[in-house]
Image (tube, rainbow, N blue to C red):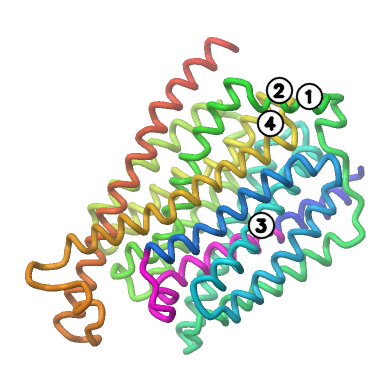
Amino acid sequence: MDTVKKTQLFNASCVALVVTALAFATRGSFVQAWATEFNLTHTQVGWIVGTAFWGFTLAMIFGGPLVDIIGIGRIISIAFFCHVVGIVLTIIATGFWSLFISTLLIGIANGSVEAACNPLITSMYTDQKTRRLNRFHAWFPTGIVIGGLAVYLFNKIGLVDWRYAMGIMLLPTFVYGYMFLNKVFPQTERVVSGFTYKDMLKACVSPLFIFMASCMILTAGTELGTNQWIAALLANVSDNPILLLVWISGIMALARQFGGTLIHNLKSTVVLLTSSILAFIGCILMGYTSGAMVFASAGIFALGVAFFWPSMLGFVSENIPQSGALGLAIMGGIGFLGGAIAQPVLGAIFDSQTIAAVPAGQTVEVLKSALAGTKEAAMWASAQLTGGEHTLRFVAFVPAVLIIAFIFLHIWKRKHV
């Protein structure tokens, strides 16, 4: 395959990933809107939001093994179809179940993009997998920045209905569908290398792979769980809390886009350990700081989670190449499983911590229904902010576990080099 075709396929993959990011960014800003419009609890919204992660996981688990059988192009066609249908159904949703089903379809679409594009990129760039995966995955936070700024702009000009923000996702969806149209796709790296399907299955149950898959649940839960809820958790830090997600995502995008060479030259275990430490510090600081300092704390967190996803995939692809497309699919699927688990858990923690912060003698029902500008409304806003800060302190436990895990991995890797 010549360079021009590689470039075309890589660029099309990046646009497809932008769509998955737009779904993530806009959905994060809809948490409060859905709760209010459809009279849902944060736990119910957590289940809806988490459905996208379950759909992603299903698509990765079933799409990964099928990449070698039906081809990368057909998996991308499934992604395109589910994106279009899921977006339209979300726009016309009327309540919990319609949001649940439409979000599930979008999750399947997002998972299909990852199931197809990750092995596509590692097959085209076998000598620079981690670097290229970082550049590819830089477009996920870039898409979140685009989506977040779009939501911010719509709010500024009075288009406060979340359906407008949802609708803009259709444009890049049709763009990537056109870019992939009639393209010739390469065979996966496993097929080219001569590894059998049995070799792939065996590699995916090896102790090292199982260890990395377990860590992927935690790294993805730290990144995706926190970022999905950050606008709601710290809603009272800024008049436009979506800007906090934009800030985090912007730092992640720059780190992945321009830090690829640095990461390529460092030991992956060092990168993962350092990332865990920064993510832990960032979560703790966001849980204790206020005002402008929250953005500084969020910047530390962003640097921590920036290299988690691509570096985990790169480590598996480079150290367990026999795992092939299935290995990458399982890692991605397990990662979004971590994100799925995190959504209702974070929602439930947020609810409980908010209730605990309600002043004595007051009730949640009264404060929640208070008119803007009243003393009760201010109490509710304060309780929610306190609940969000305390939730972030709970989140810090996850990267703390990862610090221990990656210290172990680094020591093990040094002994087996």
- Local crowd size for mark 3, using a 10 Å CA cut-off: few (<14), some (14–19), many (≥20): many
What's the distance in space between the residues labelled 2 and 3, CA to CA?
A: 26 Å
The residue lying toward the viewer, choosing from 400 and 348, is 348
Amino acid bearing label 1: Lys
Q: Residue at x 50, y 51 (%)?
A: 340
What's the distance in space between the residues labelled 3 and 4, CA to CA?
A: 23 Å
Q: Which mark is residue 198?
A: 1
Q: Give the number of the mark in front: 1 or 4.
A: 1
> Residue 122 appears in which quarter of the rendering?
top right
Residue 231 located left or right of residue 108? left
Disc 3: which residue = 108
Q: Residue at x 38, y 36 (%)?
A: 277
- Discs 1, 2 touching: Cβ within 8 Å: yes
Q: Indicate which disc, 1 or 4, sits on the residue closer to the N terminus.
A: 1
What's the distance in space between the residues labelled 1 and 4, CA to CA?
A: 17 Å
Magenta-highlighted residues: 16-42
Image coordinates for residue 400, horizontal then vertical, percent: 35, 35
